[in-house]
Image: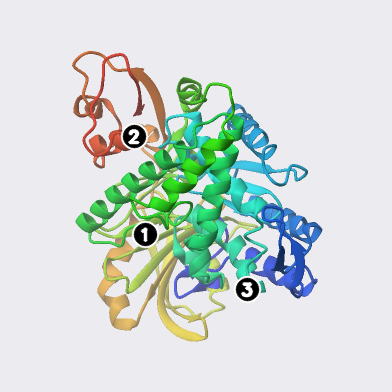
Amino acid sequence: MLSGPVWLTTILGKPMLRGMKSFITCLILSGWLLLPGCATNPVTGKQDLVLMTEDQEIGLGRRAHREMMRQYRPYNDPELQRYVEEIVRELSQQSHRKDLVFHVTVLDSPQINAFALPGGYIYITRGIMAYMNSEAELAGVLGHEIGHVTARHGVRQQSAGTLTDLVGKGIEVLTGSQIASQAAGIGGVALIRGYGRKHELEADRLGAEYLARVGYDPEEMISVLGILKSQEEFERKLAEQEGREPNVYHGIFSTHPDNDSRLQEVVQAADKFRSPVARKVNRERFLRLVEGLTFGPGESDGVLRDQKFYHGDLDLFIEFPEGWKIENLPSRLVASPADGELQLLVAVEDLNRYLTPKEFLTRQTQGRLRQGQDIQTGDFAGYTGYTTLNIKGTPRPGRVAAVIQGTRVYTITAIGKDQSVLDRYDRRVLHTVRSMRHLKGGEKKLAKPQRIRLIRAKPGDTFASLAKQSTLTNHPVEQLRLINGMYPKGELKPGQWIKIVH
């Protein structure tokens, strides 16, 4: 949770990514996005109608990468980062753009995704790596993204607006929410769902070729598809049970149906490029390197368990209403009831001067606070009241609160569709504010992220028995099967290396 008061940067409860928006605007105004011209496609050798030269493409990618790294964190595991870089280097040297330096970053995000920006910038989340079980599967994902870059799919989009979507695609990947991309003015359904079927299939073909040339089995791309389809099937079932929309994966391979014959064809066609050396899988090497990988939210983001939020660094506990959907975004917490007619946002910032909660709120609302009152949370002093929020040019009723913890201030903003909605949920909003307190002794361990551990299956071990030893609380048997590539009904063999979560 970062940034300042939520009501100053909100569009109907949806946080505006002001830095990204101004960054994209600056690119457009400074002439980085130019009128179309022709250039030779490095893959086909034919002339393409494109928006920029290769130097301009690299410049755009460099600037987009800097902004991405201001918004999001790389995963702090140097050995894992070097490992991924090594695979990308090997694959890219077999690509159609051998002279291009590829930059890959493992991102500290639980979302299941990978994506590429123009100019050779590739990103893969620790979230997707948790579901892989071999180096060859990892290479399949990275090879696909290298294929997008070598074929210049980003540059071949036909409008400047589409190119801004490329940057926005990364935002949605990392937040796991369409809130961020929509609020920043980044639409582009086609790009959020990938580059379109034609370009996705071309990236599959190129990725399979690069895998084969290096010595991996291109069939591993189909294995990755199976992993993603299993995860999506589980997410859809879970969403139906919980009465919410599924948070399904919209990246690589997502346009393929289960039995896509064309994917089979491009994979088989890549066999002619196979290296004469034995085909690499490197399962144990990969598993050794992902042991200890954070699973789910990271420690610096706080941890959500059921309706409770634990943050070790902030020494903070918050409890949200039963049945509400909660999103732990990089800049704030966003919670909403099932009907979606109200959004509750929680953010934190450092105080620059010593103020009471009342003084802080009065300043932030410019004196437009109504029915103000003190509110005592579990451990902190606070102040709350009603105000009218200007949301995208439309006045909306809101309850705002400020809770001060030392030199930090938490801002809580509830925005209703109308006053009747705000009144209906007001008691639950106030209960959430009053729940804020320090962590208790036994709760500090709940603020620690879960991590992947490796064990060898013993005779008699089952996923059900291992689930009882895991800290997973939400469908632990299914989740263990998913991260081990054995969903929905696979079982263990004695001596097999298995990933568990603690």
Above or below, 14 relative to 118: below
Q: Is residue 365 left or right of residue 500?
A: right
Residue at the spot of label 1: 433
Q: Is residue 273 left or right of residue 378?
A: right
Above or below, 226 relative to 470: below
Q: Is residue 107 visible?
A: no
Q: CA distance from mark 2 to mark 3?
A: 38 Å
Task: Give the residue displayed 41% in from the left and 42% down from the top.
Answer: 222
Q: Amino acid at mark 3?
A: Gly
Q: Amino acid at mark 2?
A: Gly
Q: Is residue 455 left or right of residue 352?
A: left
Secondary structure under badge 1?
helix
Give how far across and how far down residue 372 sits, in percent. Answer: 41, 74
Secondary structure under badge 3?
helix
Task: Give the residue displayed 20% in from the left and 55% down from the top.
Answer: 241
Q: CA distance from mark 3 to mark 1?
A: 40 Å
Q: Is residue 123 visible?
A: yes
Disc with the residue nearer the chain's start (1 vs 2): 1
Q: Amino acid at mark 1?
A: Val
Give how far across and how far down residue 382 sits, in percent. Answer: 43, 60
Rate crowding at label 3 as few (under 14), some (14 to 19) or many (20 or more) other CA atoms within 10 Å: some
Q: Quadrant of residue 485?
A: top left
Give how far across and how far down residue 330 sits, in percent. Answer: 52, 53
Give how far across and how far down residue 254 sits, in percent. Answer: 42, 55
Question: Residue 161: which disc?
Answer: 3
Disc with the residue nearer the chain's start (3 vs 1): 3
Secondary structure under badge 2?
loop
Between 394 and 223, the one lying in front of the other is 223
The reply to whether dot 3 and dot 1 touch (C-beta < 8 Å) is no
Residue at the spot of label 2: 485
Between 44 and 293, the one lying in front of the other is 44
